[in-house]
Every structure is written in structure tokens, then in C-alpha cells.
Image (spheres, rainbow, N blue to C red):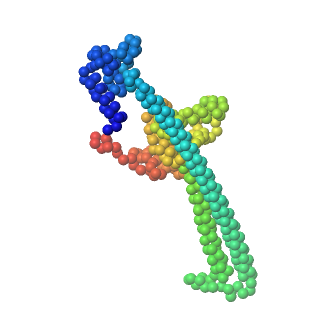
Amino acid sequence: MSRGQLREDKVKAEAALGRKDGKCGTCVKLVEDGVQCEICDQWFHPHCQGISESLYKMLVDYKDDIHWFCQGCRGGAEKLLLVMSKLQTKVDRLEDELVRATNEVKKDFSQKLKDLQSELRKEIGKEWEQVQSTIKASQSKMDTVVGELHAKVVEFGDRLEQSDCKADVQEVGDGGAKKLWSSVVEQKILGVTEDVKALKQTTVQICQDREEQCEIEKRKNCAVIQGLTEPIGDDAETRKRQDKDRITEILHELQCDDVSVNAAIRLGKLPAQGEAKIRPVKIIFSSEEQKERVLSKAKNLKSKGSLGLDRVFIHQDLTPKQRMQRNLLVKELKDRQAAGEQGLIIVNNKIVTRKPRLESMESA
């Protein structure tokens, strides 16, 4: 057994003895009013440890808040506290460094992601321009060919009508009716013309669908707030700051404090003085996932009447085509409600009947 171990056992034995017989660790006399060392657990008379009456009273009054060590343990305790203090300083520095490194990684990743998105948009834009250019060129060629064919048919028909061999170019059709050959050819060309027109319409529809998808892609991180009180202020910066503070309050009430808003834009012309019009606010979130979180909780604003948010409504930013379809659905919904239908709601761009709540079913 080592000397260090023997010394440690001796200290423990003496401490146990002191606690057992209640004697002072210095003078070995009985302790009635004393102080206990937090390291060795030995009791001591205040005067044996050089403790004044005022300090002793403070130790008694604040025993749960003040640490005291005897003279035998004080040297080691001071060294231990110094080591612990240095360790804590190093831990704090490491934590600060970790936070800084984490923020730098997040910032770098966010920037790289934005750069990648920008490059993808540019590439998609170039390809889309090429597709549009090719489609326009094809349409122009088709128009030219159809025009030339039609002109030749008309010209050939005129010549046949004027020639002496008009009877030789007549054919017997179904039911014995006679037709000029030029008329037959013209009908065939007209059929081709109709096919080309149908092809053009299909091409135009494809272009419109592609443009619609591009518009939807642009709006995937966007939502629109309706009913948010117009800000008060003479300059644009003051109004923007008021909108930002109000949006922050809304996100807090929806328990979405960690959601990042890249931009908030009032849509439409600034209302004139005294005009009651409230412009919608377009919000651009950092990600589609954050936008979906806000939309999923937006219905909770109805219960925030005390904050003036019960008339605020948040919905997906729609394309012009989607808005037109939505307006038609709303009109149909109102017409059906006026006709007596009840419990109708719009879900996933369809009018459906609201399912009865469980409470209503139980009461029934």
C-alpha cells in the first residue's frame, strides 16, 4: 500500500472519529458551537481556526451558500478550485469556439446552397429559352409551309376551273356525286392544316404548362398574409420595420420563432390617407419546410383575438392561374351555400363536405 493511500485512510479515520465523538479536530475538545470542513467533515471550534465572531455568525446564517475549509484542507482546496477555474475557462473557450465553428459551417453551407440554387436556375433558364426558341422556329416553319400549300392548292384549283378539260378531272364520290379533283386535294390539305393547328395548340399548351410550373417553383417558399394592419409611417423604412415586428409577433404566437424570413413585401399601391384598404403581405421563407410549418399552424390565429390577429389569414402564394381557379371554386362554394347546402369546405382545390365532429356525433 502506498504512502498516499495510508495518509488518505488516516484522514478518513480521523474525520470519522471526529464526527462520532464531536470533538474539535484541532484541540480534541468537545464541540458545541463550531464549523464543519466541507472536505474532511471534521468539526472545529471557531477560535481554533482563527474565525472571528462576525465571520462565524455569517457562516451560520449563510451555511448553504458559503463554502468553508479547515486550515489543513484549505491549501489543497485552493489548488483544486484554481484548477477547476482554469478548466471552466477552457471549457467556456471551447464552447465559444464550437459555436463559432458551427455558425461558420452553417453560413458556408447556406451560401453554397444559395449558389447552387442560383446556378440551377440559370441552367434551367438557358434550357427553357432554347426550348422556346426551337418551338417558335418550328411554329414559324409550319405556318410558312401551310401557307404555301394552301396558296398552291387555290392556284391549282383556279387553273382547273378555267381549263377545257374540266370534265376529265372529275371523280365520282360516294353516292354518285361528282367532285373536282382540285376540291378533293384542297380538302386533304385542309385536313393537314387542321392537324397542324392542333399540333400548334398542343405546343402552346405545353409551353403554358411549363411556364405555370416555373411560376409554382418560384413561389414554393412563399406565403401571403391577408388582413395584417397597414403600418403607420411617412417613410418606407419605418413601415417595413413595423411589418417585420408584426410578422415576428405572428411567428411567436404560432410557436415558429426559429423560422427565418428572407423578405416581406406589401403587394399593391400604398393606400391613400384615410383609405381603409389593407394590402396583402408576401413572405419569402428560407425553405419550403419552414413555410409548410407556418401554414399548418396558421389556423391557430383565430384564437388570438386579444392580439388583433383573429382576422389575419395566411395562405400559399398562388400563381395567376391558381388564383383564377380558386376564385371559381369560392364562387361555386357560395352559390351552393346560397342554395341550401351546408358543411361545405374547400380542400385540395375541391369542394367537399366537412366531416361531423366527434362531439356532435356523441351528442346525437
Image coordinates for residue 342, horizontal then vertical, percent: 39, 45
Figure check: 295 above or below 211: above
Residue 356 visible, this orientation: yes
Image position of 132 (left or right of 252): right
Image position of 218 (left or right of 361): right
Count of numbered marks: 0
**Image quarter for residue 106?**
top right
Furthest residue toward top: 53
Q: Residue at x 67, y 70 (%)?
A: 142
Who is closer to the viewer here, 321 or 24? 24
Q: Residue at x 61, y 51 (%)?
A: 115
Q: Residue at x 33, y 35 (%)?
A: 5
Quarter of the figure that contains the N terminus: top left
Residue 218 visible, this orientation: no
Image coordinates for residue 176, horizontal then vertical, percent: 58, 84
Who is closer to the viewer here, 271 or 103? 103
Image coordinates for residue 182, horizontal then vertical, percent: 67, 80
Image position of 51 (left or right of 231): left
Who is closer to the viewer here, 204 or 195? 204
Q: Residue at x 53, y 47 (%)?
A: 287
Image position of 361 (left or right of 133): left
Who is closer to the viewer here, 349 or 232? 232
**Image quarter for residue 140?**
bottom right
Figure check: 128 above or below 268: below
Furthest residue toward left: 21
Quarter of the figure that contains the C terminus: top left
Figure check: 178 above or below 351: below
